[in-house]
Amino acid sequence: MTTRFTFDGTALEAPRGLTIAGALLANGIVAWHRTPAGGRPRGVFCATGVCFDCLVDVDERQAVRACLIPLRDGAEVRTSASGRPSASGRPSASGRPRASGPGAE
Ligand code: FES
């Protein structure tokens, strides 16, 4: 049983039941996000939802953690140009983290 999806427009398959990160790794893709500062490549680091190195855009959602989201059949996964999402889970327009809390702009 396989799940079909696209990554940056390329049709791919992965065994059913994987996360998005697992499916990308199963296809030999190890980096799919770039740091906002410096543009360094990132992929899976913690695999537990803590580090935010694995951000991808999936369908209409931006900057989701690929290590936490199960891959669904027909998903359109894209390299994320966004930075770390805000506390609300939505990235800022600039792709940089949103300031929050006392003293935030
Ligand atoms: S690999 Fe760290 S949050 Fe996904």
Image (cartoon, helix red, strand yellow):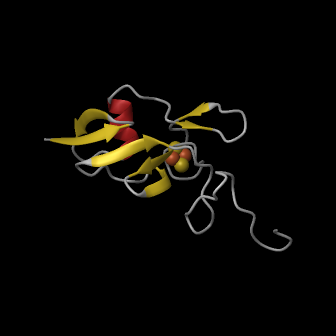
- Single out the residue that lies furthest toward the right: 103
Give whichever of 40, 19 is nearer the camera.
Answer: 40
Identify the residue at image location x=36%, y=39%. 22
Residue 13 lies left or right of residue 8; in this view the side is left
Residue 24 lies left or right of residue 34; in this view the side is left
Residue 26 pos. (x, y %)? 33, 31
Q: Quadrant of the C terminus?
A: bottom right
Residue 12 pos. (x, y %)? 26, 33
Residue 53 lies left or right of residue 78; in this view the side is right
Residue 82 pos. (x, y %)? 58, 48
Vertical relation: 28 (above or below) 72: above
Residue 91 pos. (x, y %)? 59, 58
- Single out the residue that lies furthest toward the left: 1
- Single out the residue that lies furthest toward the bottom: 102
How many badges with numbers are in the image?
A: 0
Residue 5 lies left or right of residue 98; in this view the side is left
Quarter of the figure with residue 60: bottom left
Give whichever of 12, 26 is nearer the camera.
Answer: 12
Q: Quadrant of the N terminus?
A: top left
